[in-house]
Image (cartoon, rainbow, N blue to C red):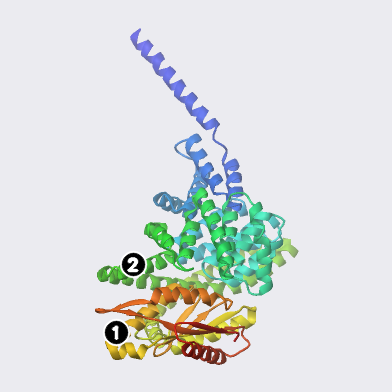
């Protein structure tokens, strides 16, 4: 009787467990339903919706997921890490599983979304070869096949353009995204414009892009709106509209923090360190761990750490961090070289693929055979290209070490480590050419340290060298990332401010006066002033004529009592 009672109790417990499992599984959507929701969320960059899908899978599906649902969970995990920079170990495991999956049975749009995430993760971790291989799959297999499907084509174009933007293959980005500026879907137009703003080829392209971005406020609170807002912040800074830029920046911070979009926060903090350097941006950047930063993001952060260590006279830490930054810079140079090789190969491939896609639409009977043959050709070409790139990379690394060293010697002033006269003159000519082409103004400013000979005669040449190096170092922290400072000769300095109106030099001059006034040379505390002449250029006058005009204005400033700025039209 006791044995029978135990049997009944066990049977009831088993039935209860089965009922609980069925209740849990009944709330778990099918793989098809999850895939549909995830694809829509990825297209619209709806970060919160992607996170909700992952939560639903974890809460309502069995602990051992089916392969189809596990793929969806892994893709959601990867997307969340790319934009929130959290759960790095989970993201690595998800990426490793996705790398072993076969996506060929999935819809093209879904395949492109997964490959897109894998390529972005590879770029984040510095695996450029892996990212280029994945990008090649999208470009050669998915993009041509979607030529007659408008919705798929737009989504795949965005995926490829996003990857190509990260590897600086800008011509491809423009070709893929310019047609999308008139797409009927608002979020697609804005996604395209948010990337195109960074790389306009003409003023008309920039105007078309800004026209799309100006309507950002109508968007829902997603990454699409945040990316548009980020571009508009940068536009305000380019136009030197500081009040508007500050208001937009605060709006961007609020949205980024609400979405927990750390990837955008990192870019905004980096932006704060450039326009001009902000203690808030520096403090926030230094709080991120290395695995939360991509390789490109790690380099400016390392430079900030070097500056902090130097300022606190922690020379050992400054040297170690500088060596780390130099090693990282070499790795980025190798990756950029690899990307340039890929870009050349890809331009030829894309032209061929698009032509074949058109032929396939006209000759349906031969489509299957042509596709198989083409796939084999591209596979062999890719293998050959990778082998060739491997050999070229080994040769490049050896030559690059020597080239970088000699290039730096040729372009850098030995004492102050800023551009020398030849290099700053070359940069100025490039700016003038671009200014003439795009119709953008720029500023040429010539500065001269007041009474420098007296400093040398009174305190010695060592003190004079300290004044020169401190002037260069402090001025470099005040100019924008796209501007340049060069030593023109002796105590004279040439500053080139790109895409800037002449009145912007007033603010720079005031900040320089404040920053450079007090310099300590050994036991001596020196009060240092300087005079400046500045002219505006538009590409019509030669650089030599502009420098001559700035020199004449500098002479006027000296004759008017020094420690002042004189401006002219150029």
Task: Out of 342 and 465, give the one closest to the viewer.
Answer: 465
When asked about the image quadrant of residue 350, the answer is: bottom right
Q: Secondary structure at mark 1?
A: helix
Residue 340 as seen in the image, left or right of residue 458:
right
Residue 538 as seen in the image, left or right of residue 413:
right
- Judged by depth in the image, the label closer to the viewer, 2 or 1, is 1
Most extreme residue toward the right, as rendered? Answer: 362
Say few, some or many: other residues with alpha carbon within 10 Å of mark 1 (under 14 / 14 to 19 / 20 or more): many
Task: Out of 247 and 117, give the one closest to the viewer.
Answer: 247
Residue at screen point 69% across, 72% down: 204
The residue carrying mark 2 is 308
Most extreme residue toward the top, as rendered? Answer: 1
Q: In the image, residue 184 lies at what x, y percent?
A: 72, 56
Residue at screen point 57% across, 55% down: 226
Say few, some or many: other residues with alpha carbon within 10 Å of mark 2 (under 14 / 14 to 19 / 20 or more): some
Residue 463 numbered mark, or none? 1
Q: In the image, residue 17 lies at what x, y percent?
A: 45, 24
């Amino acid at each position: 009787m006791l044995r029978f009672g135990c049997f009944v109790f066990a049977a009831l417990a088993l039935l209860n467990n089965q009922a609980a499992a069925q209740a849990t599984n009944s709330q778990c959507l099918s793989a098809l339903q999850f895939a549909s929701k995830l694809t829509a969320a990825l297209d619209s960059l709806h970060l919160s919706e992607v996170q909700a899908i992952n939560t639903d899978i974890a809460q309502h599906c069995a602990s051992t997921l089916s392969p189809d649902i596990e793929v969806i969970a892994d893709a959601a995990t990867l997307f969340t890490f790319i934009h929130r920079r959290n759960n790095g170990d989970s993201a690595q495991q998800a990426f490793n599983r996705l790398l072993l999956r076969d996506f060929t049975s999935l819809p093209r749009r879904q395949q492109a979304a997964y490959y897109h995430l894998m390529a972005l993760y590879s770029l984040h971790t510095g695996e450029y070869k892996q990212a280029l291989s994945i990008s090649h799959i999208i470009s050669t297999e998915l993009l041509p096949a979607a030529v007659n499907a408008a919705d798929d084509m737009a989504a795949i174009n965005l995926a490829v353009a996003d990857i190509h933007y990260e590897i600086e293959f800008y011509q491809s980005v423009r070709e893929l995204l310019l047609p999308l500026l008139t797409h009927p879907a608002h979020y697609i137009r804005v996604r395209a414009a948010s990337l195109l703003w960074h790389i306009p080829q003409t003023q008309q392209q920039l105007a078309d892009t800004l026209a799309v971005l100006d309507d950002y406020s109508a968007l829902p609170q997603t990454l699409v709106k945040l990316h548009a807002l980020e571009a508009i912040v940068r536009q305000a800074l380019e136009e030197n509209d500081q009040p508007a830029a500050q208001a937009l920046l605060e709006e961007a911070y609020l949205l980024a923090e609400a979405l927990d979009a750390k990837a955008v926060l990192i870019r905004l903090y980096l932006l704060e360190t450039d326009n001009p350097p902000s203690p808030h941006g520096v403090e926030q950047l230094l709080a991120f761990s290395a695995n939360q930063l991509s390789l490109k993001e790690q380099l400016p952060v390392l430079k900030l750490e070097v500056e902090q260590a130097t300022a606190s006279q922690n020379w050992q830490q400054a040297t170690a961090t500088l060596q780390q930054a130099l090693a990282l810079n070499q790795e980025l140079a190798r990756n950029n070289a690899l990307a340039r090789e890929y870009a050349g190969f890809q331009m030829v491939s894309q032209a061929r693929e698009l032509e074949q896609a058109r032929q396939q639409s006209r000759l349906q009977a031969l489509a299957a055979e042509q596709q198989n043959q083409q796939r084999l050709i591209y596979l062999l070409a890719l293998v050959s290209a990778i082998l060739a790139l491997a050999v070229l990379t080994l040769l490049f690394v050896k030559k690059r070490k020597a080239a970088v060293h000699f290039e730096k010697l040729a372009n850098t002033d030995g004492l102050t480590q800023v551009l020398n006269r030849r290099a700053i003159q070359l940069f100025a000519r490039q700016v003038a050419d671009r200014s003439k082409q795009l119709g953008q103004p720029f500023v040429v400013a010539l500065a001269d340290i007041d009474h420098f000979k007296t400093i040398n005669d009174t305190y010695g040449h060592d003190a004079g060298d300290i004044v020169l190096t401190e002037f260069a170092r402090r001025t470099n922290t005040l100019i924008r990332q796209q501007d340049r400072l060069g030593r023109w000769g002796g105590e004279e300095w040439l500053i080139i401010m790109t895409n800037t109106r002449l009145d912007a030099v007033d603010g720079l001059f005031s900040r320089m006066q404040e920053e450079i006034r007090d310099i300590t040379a050994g036991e001596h505390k020196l009060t240092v002033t300087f005079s400046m002449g500045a002219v505006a250029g538009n590409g019509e006058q030669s650089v030599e004529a502009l420098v001559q005009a700035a020199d004449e204005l500098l002479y006027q400033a000296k004759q008017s009592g020094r420690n002042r700025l004189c401006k002219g039209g150029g």
